[in-house]
Amino acid sequence: QVQLVESGGGLVQPGGSLRLSCATSGTIFRLYNMGWYRQAPGKQRELVAAISSGGSTNYADSVKGRFTISKDYAKNTVYLQMNSLRPEDTAVYYCNGDRPGRTYWGQGTQVTVSS
């Protein structure tokens, strides 16, 4: 049973923008802390941005000022707006929903930043 459905990845040139979407159920959207993680080849999965069920946000230092996480309450969707993309942002991006005792992961979406 798929709980988190991601979309929006692709190939973009350095300096470009992409917006990732993560659609989920109303229960997960309202009650879980939501986040975006990424994993580059040969590296560990890392937190990129997170938004709590109450709307508080936090970001990895490497993306502060360039990425924005947000929630659309009408669509039960979490977004990651990525601007000023760099080659080092290339990775598979995963949506995450988390609360004590339960974690959900999306299937991942590839983001490639290259000229």
Image (tube, rainbow, N blue to C red):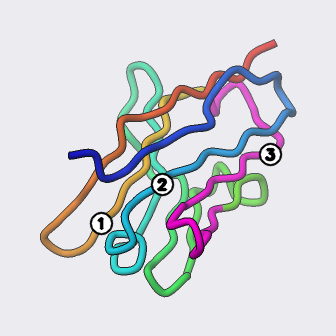
Task: Check residue 98 in the rendering and tell me which mark sits there, or answer none.
Answer: 1
- Label 2 belongs to which residue? 23
Residue 83 drawn at (x, y percent): 80, 45
Image point (64%, 33%), residue name: 89
x and y percentages locating residue 99 in the rendered image:
25, 73
Distance from the alpha carbon under mark 2 to that under mark 1: 15 Å
Q: Is residue 63 above or below residue 76?
A: above
Question: Looking at the image, which is closer to me, 4 or 64?
Answer: 4
Residue 42 falls left or right of residue 103: right
Quadrant location of the C terminus in the rendered image: top right
**Which residue does the image show at 45% across and 52% down from the upper left?**
47
> Which residue is situated farthest in the top direction here?
115
Front-most of residues 91 and 28: 28
- Give the mark nearest the N terminus, 1 or 3: 3
Label 1: which secondary element = strand
The one of 115 and 9 positioned closer to us in this rendering: 9
* Amino acid type of the residue tagged 2 in the rendering: Ala
Query: Mark 3 or mark 2, which is nearer to you?
Result: 2
Q: Residues within 10 Å of mark 3 (few under 14, many from 20)?
A: some
Which badge, 3 or 2, is on the more N-terminal residue? 2
Q: Amino acid at mark 3?
A: Asn
Residue occupying the point 86% across, 33% down: 15
**Distance (Cα) linking label 1 and label 3:** 26 Å
Task: Using a 10 Å C-alpha cutoff, classify the residue at mark 1 as few (fewer than 14 neighbours), some (14 to 19) or many (20 or more).
Answer: some
Q: Which residues are magenta?
A: 69-89
Tell me which corner region of the image, top left, top right, bottom left or bottom right, holds residue 26.
bottom left
Furthest-bottom residue in this view? 54
Reading the image, the residue beneath label 3 is: 83
